[in-house]
Image (cartoon, helix red, strand yellow):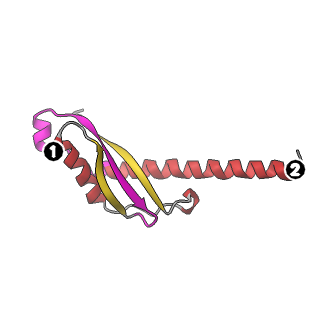
Amino acid sequence: MDRSAQSGESGTKTTKAARQAAERAYLAALQRAIARQQRYPTSARRRQQTGVATVAFVLQADGRIGGIRIAKGSGHGSLDQASLDALRRLGRFKPIPPEVGRTSWPLRVPIRFDLR
């Protein structure tokens, strides 16, 4: 294999690795931002209801969040509603980094409610 082919492969791997690292960092920051907006419903806490609701939504390049819906319910309507409310309160996140290479990003995020 000649050197130009080797450097091309290496460049592709580096670009892919950089993109994946940027995605991981961005998604971790998004998860933290959602968690800051999360509120445990008083009635659910009183009833000791716990669960995980998976919320689906589309993140636009400019950070706008749309198409929010429950992809998988927690088994408790109040927890599902609280999950939707957390995303609605967030409303917008920082723009998707250019190195991620997406103009929109359909996502599914689990939101956990536990009494710890």
Q: Residue at x 89, y 48 (%)?
A: 2
Residue at image mark 2:
3
45 relative position to 28: left or right: left
> Which quadrant holds the C terminus?
top left
Q: Residues within 10 Å of mark 2 (few under 14, many from 20)?
A: few
Is residue 21 inside the magenta stretch? no
Residue at image mark 1:
41
Q: Quadrant of residue 79?
A: top left
Residue 62 coordinates in the image, percent (x, y): 44, 67
Q: Residue at x 27, y 58 (%)?
A: 88
* Tag 2 secondary structure: helix
Q: Residues within 10 Å of mark 1 (few under 14, many from 20)?
A: some
Is residue 47 inside the magenta stretch? yes
82 or 28: nearer the viewer: 82
Mark 2 belongs to which amino acid? Arg
29 or 11: nearer the viewer: 11
Q: CA distance from mark 2 to mark 1?
A: 61 Å
